[in-house]
Amino acid sequence: MKTIYISLLICAFAGFTLQSCSDWLSLQPIDRQTVEQLFSTKEGFYTALNGVYNNIGSDYLYGKQLSWEMIDVIAQRYAISTNNDLGTKQASFDYSDAAVASGIEAMWTKAYNTILNCNVLIKNCEEKKETILTLRDYSIIKAESLLARAFLHFDMLRCFGPIYAITPEGISIPYNTLSYASTSPLLPANEVVEKVLIDINEAIQLLETNDPVISNGVMNTPGTATEEFEEIYRYRQLRFNYYSALLLKSRVLHYSGDAPNALITAKMLIDDPVVATHFPFVDPSRLLGNSSTPDRVFSTEMIFGIYNKDRGLIFKNNFSPEGTTTRLLQPRSSFVAANLFLNETQDYRYQSQWAASNAIGNTDPMFIKYMDISDNELFYATVFPLMRISEAYYIAAECETDLANAYGYLNVIREKRGVTPLSVVSASDLNTKLNNEYNREFAGEGQLFFYYKRRNITIPNAQNGRNTSSYSFNDARGVFPLPENEMTVR
């Protein structure tokens, strides 16, 4: 098979001591540095690690394709404009189309390039332990690298692997742990899950006594020279941290069908009072009646996310009828209030993340979660959530065997969203309500495709934002074909 070798490119996040999140996350390429020079200082390790986060936030991964665009288009969230040929092909599950296949291949290549960077970091952590790196430096840098590697492999499995509920032993993807470009065998899906969990568990052990988020919280502001934790340890919501490791573990266990352990791990987050302190549910006053700086992404609940200083342009160029016609991503007419929110328009998600369009001839609700706010220096003005605390409650609701307790977990989130709690009815009713919650909660965050695939269920016509058809998630629709050069950078 064709093998493509792509050189290791590390990007630096410059300006650790500047006075804003956007300054702290400014990118400056330093590809002329050799690996040896790069890893001769602790700052070099963080330069390399920040390059990993930059890749994760790129358009090929979670800055576009695996958050608000391709993956949500495939999940039938939007009524695609007839002028949007790529979107039409994606929404039609036409993975053989050249443009669709090209996007999928670019995603695969970027993911495995980033995994290679993680492996180089992990290797050098071991070599420079207690020389260049203190034990705490080593623990945090290695753990974040392990979690990035696990996170990316897991989502490549969820994209390219078989429907796990049907064929857990089906051949899926490689799991690359090598620090140089090579080839690795395609593994059964359940073996990939095992390797993902090994990385996550090691990261948890490294972080549970070393991650400053546990004692100091998210620290989403620049530090000073007199503070205990250096600038490189701050902004814990934009780095893989101890709590994101727990949520990722629960997510993986849940996906693989291990409901008892998924529940145990989710409850570690739900029952921990420190989590409630560090990641509190959004304050309604920051949403309703706050037209200038609303926190539409519910940033306080974000366990892990990415940074994008131009987030407002994503709204303008893709979700606003006034900003685009050919690429407009907007659900079908009358869908949002009646189908998505079942006329529960008091829901904070409806009130803060959807608004009627002012465009001529288009008054249907547009998705405004990523619209600009007046103060672009606020932390939540430039972030995308990839993991949020509500997911732990949804996992618990689905995995809990006691029906009343299961509804209880679901009702915690509904009450925090300003919606009336549900009465206990039946397991079938609970599943229906969970479907609806996932649709509301994770709009623009790329989780719905993975939800339908994990549960191997049909997208019902009532929850289809594109048209009024139902779509079963079979292999042809739920499994991305491996790129022709699937041995890339492994």
Image: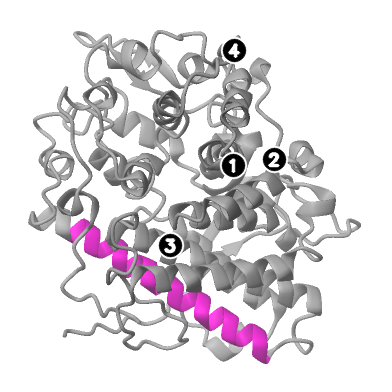
Give the residue number, with chain letter if any, for mark 1: 392
Q: Secondary structure at mark 4?
A: loop
Mark 2, residues whose alpha carbon is within 10 Å: few (<14), some, or many (≥20)? some
Mark whose residue sits in front, 3 or 2: 2
Q: Is residue 348 left or right of residue 232?
A: left
Q: Say whether residue 55 is visible.
A: no
Quarter occupied by residue 486: bottom left
Q: Earlier in the sequence, mark 3 or mark 2?
A: 3
Rendered-image quadrant of the C terminus: bottom left
State which tag comes first along the sequence, 2 or 1: 2
Cα gap from disc 3 to disc 2, whole angstroms: 23 Å
Residue shown at 48% from the left, 28% from the top: 372
Disc 4 versus disc 3: distance between alpha carbons?
Answer: 36 Å
Residues at marks 2 and 1 touching, judged by CB atoms closer than 8 Å = yes
SS assignment at label 2: helix
Residue 3: image quadrant is: bottom left
Image coords of residue 255 (percent x, y): 44, 53
Viewer-nearest of labels 2 and 4? 2
Disc 1 residue crowd, few under 14, some 14–19, many 20+, Cα 10 Å: many
Distance CA(mark 3)–CA(mark 1): 17 Å
Distance (Cα) linking label 1 and label 4:
25 Å
Q: Are marks 2 and 4 in contact (CB under 8 Å)?
A: no
The numbered mark, 2 or 4, whose residue comes first in the sequence reads 2
For mark 1, give the secondary structure. Answer: helix
Location of mark 4 (residue): 288
- Image coords of residue 54 (percent x, y): 49, 60
